[in-house]
Image (spheres, helix red, strand yellow):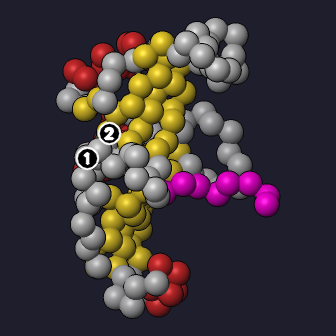
Amino acid sequence: MKGVWHFSFTVADIDRSVTFYRDLLGFELVHQQEQNNDYTRRLVGYADADLRIAQLRVPGQPRGLSTHDLELVEYRTPRGEPFGPGHRHRPGAAHLAMCVEDALAEHARLVDNGVRFVSPPQEITAGINRGGYTCYFVDPDDITLELVQPPKGAGG
């Protein structure tokens, strides 16, 4: 393996999700496109696939193999049913952890903007990140996200 190209979330409304990840979380929009072609249909395994794609990156993050870190995908066809809240314990569920300098301040800012949290920041009391803080929250599609404030002296 040479590296990670990007990670991706399937969302219900690409415009709403771009606004959330760009305007609230600080990702930078790199590119948007529609994919309604044979190659994409073969790739995703749906004969009628019609997708909208948005590619975003973390500003200042060193670029690796790709120009983006996060890809958001809206399936216009076929439409799928959302997982719904509280699915993070189900096999196949995933989450994205983002490093912040001050989890308490970032939590307060996001709460003020209507973001839903599983819990306020929790002090990490065991393991290699002991002394840091972490908390889970959800995006507009109930995708689990995490804020992590590393302990003092840790990289990140």
* Residue marked by disc 2: 138
* Residue 108, image quadrant: top left
138 or 90: which is nearer to us?
Answer: 90
In percent of width and height, residue 139 lies at 31, 42
Q: Residue at x 58, y 10 (%)?
A: 131
**Residue range of the region highlighted in magenta in the rendering:** 1-8
Q: Earlier along the polypeptide chain: callout 2 or callout 1?
A: 1
Q: Is residue 50 visible?
A: yes
Q: Which residue is mark 1?
A: 85
Viewer-side residue, 122 vs 9: 122
From this view, report whether residue 155 is shown above or below residue 91. Answer: above
Q: Label 2, secondary structure: give it.
A: strand
Decide: is 36 above or below 152.
Answer: below
Q: Is residue 150 left or right of residue 71?
A: right
Whether residue 55 is in magenta: the answer is: no
Residue name at image x 28 percent, y 50 percent = 141
Q: Where is residue 117, by image quadrant?
A: top left
Q: Give the crowd class for mark 1: few <14, some 14-19, many >=20 residues within 10 Å.
A: few
Disc 1 marks a residue whose amino acid type is Pro
User: Would residue 30 be visible to someone looking at this image?
Assistant: no
The answer to whether mark 2 and mark 1 are in CB contact below 8 A is yes
Judge whether 27 appears above or below 41 on screen: above
Q: Distance between the Cα atoms at labels 2 and 1?
A: 9 Å
Decide if residue 17 is on the left or right side of residue 42: left
Q: Position of residue 1 (x, y in %)?
A: 79, 60
